[in-house]
Amino acid sequence: KAPALAEPLTLWGIPASPSAVFARAVASGAIEAAAPGTKFDVWKSTDQMRAGIATGAFKMFATSTYAAANFHNRGAGTVMVNVVTWGLLYVMARDESIATIEDLAGKHVLLSNKNEAPDLLFRLVLGWAGLDPDKDVTLDYVGSPGEAVPLFLAGRGDVALLHEPAATAALMRAAKANVPIRRAIDITEAYGKHTGRGPKIPQVGLAVSEDFLEAHPEVVAAVHAATVDAGTWVLEHQQEAGKLTAKTLTLPAPLIAKSLPFIRLSVASAKDAREDIELYFDNLMSLNPAIVGGKKPDDSFYWG
Amino acid sequence: MGKRADRRGFRPVLFAALGIALLLVLWQVGHLAYGSLVLPGLGETAVALWRMTFAGEVGPALAATAFHAAGGWIVGALIGVLAGTLAGLVDDVRFTLRPVAIVLLGVPAIAWIVLALLWFPGHSAVVFTVAVVTAPIVFAAAAEGARSLDGDLAKMARAYRAPPVAMALDVYAPHMLSHLFPAFTATLAMSWKVSVMAELLSGVGGIGDGLAAARARVDTAETMAWVVVLVAVLIVVDRLLLQPFQRRAELWRETGGTAP
Amino acid sequence: MGKRADRRGFRPVLFAALGIALLLVLWQVGHLAYGSLVLPGLGETAVALWRMTFAGEVGPALAATAFHAAGGWIVGALIGVLAGTLAGLVDDVRFTLRPVAIVLLGVPAIAWIVLALLWFPGHSAVVFTVAVVTAPIVFAAAAEGARSLDGDLAKMARAYRAPPVAMALDVYAPHMLSHLFPAFTATLAMSWKVSVMAELLSGVGGIGDGLAAARARVDTAETMAWVVVLVAVLIVVDRLLLQPFQRRAELWRETGGTAP
Amino acid sequence: MSDALILEGVRFSYGDVPVLAGIDLAVPTGGITTLMGPSGCGKSTLLAIVAGLLEKDAGRVERNFERAAIMFQDPLLLPWRTALANVGFALKAGRVPAAERRKRAGEMLVSVGLSEADAEKYPRQLSGGMRQRVALARALVTEPDFLILDEPFSSLDGDLARQMHSLVRGIVEERGVTAIIVTHDAAEAARISERIVTLSPAPARVAGAEDVPGPSGGR
Amino acid sequence: MSDALILEGVRFSYGDVPVLAGIDLAVPTGGITTLMGPSGCGKSTLLAIVAGLLEKDAGRVERNFERAAIMFQDPLLLPWRTALANVGFALKAGRVPAAERRKRAGEMLVSVGLSEADAEKYPRQLSGGMRQRVALARALVTEPDFLILDEPFSSLDGDLARQMHSLVRGIVEERGVTAIIVTHDAAEAARISERIVTLSPAPARVAGAEDVPGPSGGR
Ligand SMILES: Nc1ncnc2c1ncn2[C@@H]1O[C@H](COP(=O)(O)OP(=O)(O)OP(=O)(O)O)[C@@H](O)[C@H]1O
Ligand SMILES: Nc1ncnc2c1ncn2[C@@H]1O[C@H](COP(=O)(O)OP(=O)(O)OP(=O)(O)O)[C@@H](O)[C@H]1O
Ligand SMILES: [Mg+2]
Ligand SMILES: [Mg+2]
C-alpha cells in the first residue's frame, strides 16, 4: 500500500462554473477513502496557480489544457488527468440578424483576454469562415470579462465574445436591466463543424503534479473516478450543484446552475481525450505555438 | 482666537463635507447619464451596502484588508523613512538607492506577485506588496527632506554637540515631517487600493475578493458598495489619525497666525 | 572644485551602477533558488529581449506605452501642481480637495476602468488612468510645499509688490520644487507601471499587451524582458531628464559647498 | 510742509497680547525720522503697519506717499537667487526690462560696497553684513519716495556704516525722499536724522519726539 | 598666564577665494578679546574655525579649553521649538535631565531679559532683539569655559546692551571664562574687553592687537 498523505489534499478548482464538478467530487465523499480530509478550493489568479505549482503546494488542480501542457513542456512536472469541460465560448449579440460566424463580417466585437485560448479560438473560427480577424471585423479588446460585460451591456460593440459563466451572468443582468441580448453563436459548434469531430473543445480539466502522481497514484485514480461520477451528478442536479459551489466560487447559486448546461460537462481521462486534445493544440499552435510551450506534450502528459 | 478655533474644528469638516458632496453629486450625475450597468445610483448602492453589512460580509473583509494595508504601510513607511534619511544625508547612498526605488516603483505587481507568494505565502504577500509600493514613495520624500534641511541649523546643532536622538527629534524630524506628510497621506490612501489588487492576484481574501465576486456577477451596485466602504475608511483614517498628527507637528507654523 | 565635479559627473553614475548591479545579483540569486518558472535567469532574459527586439516587437510597444505614460503624467502633474498650490494657499480649498484626492488615490482602477473606457475610448483611457494616479500624489506634495513656504519671504515679496509671475517663479517655485521633485520622481516611475496595468485592462496595446501575451504563454523570460525594458527606460528618463533638472533647480543649495 | 505719514491712535495686538497701545505720530515729508525704543517694544510691528503688511486693530493711518520701500530687520533674501537677482527682484513690480534691471541692481550693489564677484553670490555665501547691504540695496533700487529701514546698519563696521549713512542721506536730500529708520545707536540717530521718535516698552506709545539740532551737520 | 587659544598662520579659502591669509593670534585665558574688522573680512569664518566647524586649509590651531559655546551671527534658532526649548536644546549634549534643562533654560532666559510668556513663544513670534537674546542665552546656559560670540548685541537697545555686557562680563569674571566677541562698535569693545584684535579686509590678517587700558573699569 502506498504511504498515507503527509497532509490533506486540496483540490483546486478554476474560478468558473466547471468547478462545480470538483466541488461535488469532494462533497460526495468518494475521495475520503483514498485521501481522507480532502478539501475543495478555487484559485483566484494564474499567478496564484503558478506560485502553487512552483512551490509544490498545488498537487491536484483544475486548469486549461493548454496551460497544463505549457507547464509540462517547461519541466514543471504537470500531468493532465482528465478533461471536464468541452467548450464554453459564445458570441453574444444584441441583434437578431446574427446567427453564424459569417454574419460577423463588418461587426464590432468586444472581447477579453487577448492572446489567450478564447481569443485564439475565435480567430481560428473566423479564419475558417473566410473572415480576416484583423480586417473583416473590429476586435475591441478589454482586460477581462469584468470589463467586457458592463461595456457590452452599456452599448459598446455589436457582439461580445464571452465564456461561461460570464455569458450567463451577462444574460441574467441584461434581463434585469431589460436589455435584449442573446446567445447568438456557439463557437464550439463552429469549431466542431470544421474539425468534423463534433462540438468538442477539450478546454479545462484536472492536472496533477508529477511527484504527487508518482507517490500516490491511487489517490489520483480515486479523484478521477469521483470526478467522473460528479460530472454525471452535476448535470442531473444543477440547482444543488450551484448551491454547493456558490460559496467557494463567490457566485450566486442560480447563476452557476444556469450556466452549467452551456459548458459541455463530460469527464474523460486525458488518455481517452488525447486525440481531441492534440487536435486542439494543433489548432492553437497554428496561430501561436508558444501558447503550449512550443511543442505538443509527450506521452507522459496524458494520464489514464 | 475665534478664527483659530474655526481652523481646527468646524471649518475643515464643513469643507471636507463639501468635497465629498461634490463627489457624490458627480457620481449621481454619472449614474443618470450612463445607467446602473456602468454606474449604479446612490440609492441602489446604499441598499447593497446595507444588505452586505447585515449579511456579515463587510466586517471580515474589511478587517482582512485593513490588516494588509496597515501592516504593509507601516513596514513600507518605516523602511522608506530610514533609507530615505540616510540617502538624504549621504550622497552615495542616494545614488545607489535611487535606481532601486525606481525599480520598485516601476515594475508592475503582476511581474513579481508570484515571487512574493513564494517568499511570503498567504497574507504576508499582500503586506509585502503594499510595503513595496509605500517604501519608495516615502523614500523619495524623506531623501529630499533630509537633503533640504537648512545646513546652518544642522551646523548649529553640531556645534552644540547634540546627541543623535536630539539631532533626529529636534533638528531633522520637524523639517522632514513637512516633506513626509504628503507622502504619508498618499501612500496610506494607495495602500488600500494596492492591497485590494494584491488580494485579487494572490487570492487571500479581503475586500479584493468581494470586489472580484461582485464584478463576476456584474453586480455594479455591490461593486460600488465595496468602493464606498474602502473610501469611507480611508477618509476616516486620514481625518482621525493623520490630520491631527500633522496639525500637532505643524503647530509652530500657525500659532499667532494673525501675521500677514 | 574637483569634489564638486565628482558630484556631478562620475560618482552618481558609479553608485547608480552599483545599485543596479545589486538588483541584478539579487535577481540571479532568486533565479538560482526558484528556477525559471518563477524567475528566469539573466541569460534567458537577455536572449528573449534580443529576440523580441529583433522581431520588432519592442519598439512600437515602447512607443505606445511611453505616449500613455508621458501624456498621463504631464496632465496629472499639471493638475496636481495647480490644484495643490491653490490648496496650499487657501485652507478651505485644501479641506475640500483632500477627500477628493483620497478618493482618487484609494479607489482601485478596476472600479472605474469601465467608466474611463466609456468616456475616453482607446488610448485616452490609459492616459486618464495615469493622470488620476499622478495628480493626487503631486497635489499632496504641492499643497504642503505651498503651505510650508517661509511666510516672511512671501511677506517680503508682497511688500515689493511682486507681480504674480515673479511671485510664482522667484518665491514659490524654488521652494516648492524641493517638495515636488520626490513626487515627480515617484509618479513618473509609477506612471509606466500604471499605464502597463491600464493597457492590460483596456487592451489598447503597448507594453501591457506584450506582458499579457507573455504571461498567457507562461513565458517568464519574455515577461522579465518586458520588465527590463520598462525599468531601463525609467532609469534613463530619470537620469537624463529629471536629475539634471533637479540639479539645476537646487544649484543654490550646493554652490560653494565646502561649508560644514 | 505737509506730513508724509500720519498715525493717530494706532493700536495693534498679536492675539490677545497688545503691542501697540495707541501710537500718534506725524512724519514730515522729506528728511529722516529715526525710531528708537527698547527691544521688543513694537518698532518692527509699527513699520509693518506703516508699510501696509499688517492691519491695525484701531486708529488711523494716512499715507501721503506713492511708493514705499521697506528693508526688514532680517535681510529676507531669496536664498535661491544671487545677490544681483535679489536686488533686481524689487524692480519686477515696475515691469523694468531684464537688462535694465540687471544694470540698476548692479549699480546699486556697487553703491553699497559689494564687488561684482559678490553680486553673483547666493545669500548663504555672503557674510552677515553683506546680506544686510544687499537688503538695503534692494530697498533703495526701487527709487521710492518713502523709505522704511529696520535697523539697516546694525551689522556694519564703523567706516561702512558711515558710508551707508551718507548714501541714504544723499538719496533723501537729492530726491526729497522721506525715510523712517529704526536704530538702537543714539549717536547714529543724532548723526543722520532730523527727528528722533522714542517708543516706550510694550505695549508701546510714543514716549518722546525731539528734533535733532542741525541734522545733517553732524555728518 | 597661559593662552586659551593659539592660531598660527591659519589660512582658509571658500573654493578658490582666499578669506583668511594667515592669521596669527593668541587669546590669553580669562577675560574678553573683541574681534573687529570690516564687513566681509572673515571674522565669522575665523570663529567657525576656532569652534571646529570649518577645517582650516593650513596653519595651526591650539585649543586649551574644554567646552566651547558659540553664538552665531544669525540667531539660528530651531523654528519649531519655543524659546525655552531652544535654550534647553544646548543642554542636551550634557545629558541633563529634562526638568533640570527647563529650569536652567528658564533662568537663563530671565537673565537675558525675557519674560515667562516670551519663553513659550516660537522664534517667529519674537522680535529680532529677543531672538538674539535667546541665542545668547543658549550659548551661556551650557556653562562653557570658552565663549564665542558673533555680534551678540547688535540688535539690542543701549540699556539692554549694557545689561548684557555686565551679564557676560560677570560670567567671564566669576567663572574665569575666556570669551572672544565680534563687534562693530568701538565703544562697546573698549567698554567690555581686555583686548581688541583688528582684522584687515579680506583676505584677512591681523592688522592690530591692543590691550584696553582698565578693561572692566569702563563699565
Ligand atoms: N559659504 C560660503 N561660500 C563662499 N564664500 C563665503 C561663504 N561664507 C562666507 N563667504 C565669503 O567669505 C568672506 C568672509 O565672510 P565672513 O562671514 O567670515 O565675514 P565677516 O567678517 O563675518 O563679515 P560681517 O561683519 O559682514 O559678518 C565674505 O567675502 C563672504 O562672501
Ligand atoms: N508673529 C508674532 N506673533 C506673536 N507675537 C509677536 C509676533 N511678532 C512679534 N511679536 C511680539 O510683539 C512684540 C513686538 O515685536 P517687534 O518685532 O515689533 O519688536 P521690536 O520693537 O522690533 O524689537 P527689536 O528691537 O527687538 O527688533 C514682541 O513682544 C514680540 O514678542
Ligand atoms: Mg524689530
Ligand atoms: Mg560675520
Image (cartoon, coloured by chain):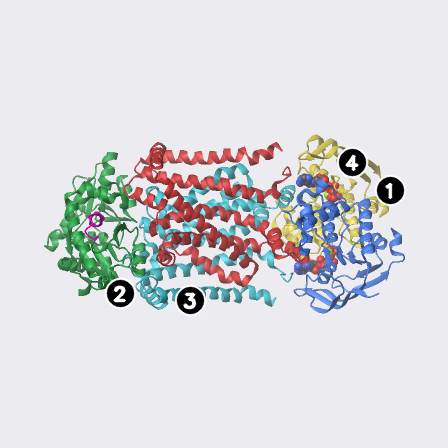
Chain colours: A green, B red, C cyan, D yellow, E blue
Helix, strand or loop at disc 1?
A: loop
Q: Which mark is residue C25?
A: 3
Tally the numbered discs. 4
Name the residue tied to disc 4: D28
Same-subunit check for callouts 2 and 3? no
- Residue holding disc 1: D214
Q: Is residue B28 above or below residue D157?
A: above
Element type at mark 2:
loop
Q: Residues within 10 Å of mark 4 (few under 14, many from 20)?
A: some
Any part of residue A63 in sight: yes
- The residue lying toward the viewer, choosing from C240 and B134, is B134
Distance from the alpha carbon under mark 2 to that under mark 4: 98 Å
In this rendering, position of residue A276 left or right of residue E195: left
Q: Please state which amino acid type lies under the numbered disc 1.
A: Gly
Q: Are marks 2 and 4 on the same chain?
A: no
Q: Nearer the viewer, mark 1 or mark 2?
A: 2
Task: Name which residue type carries label 4.
Answer: Pro
How packed mark 1 is, by other alpha carbons closer than 10 Å (few <14, some 14-19, many 20 or more), is few
Whole-percent x, y for residue A144 in the image: 29, 48
Q: CA distance from mark 2 to mark 3?
A: 25 Å
**Badge number at residue A75:** 2
Label 3 neighbour load within 10 Å: few <14, some 14-19, many 20+: few
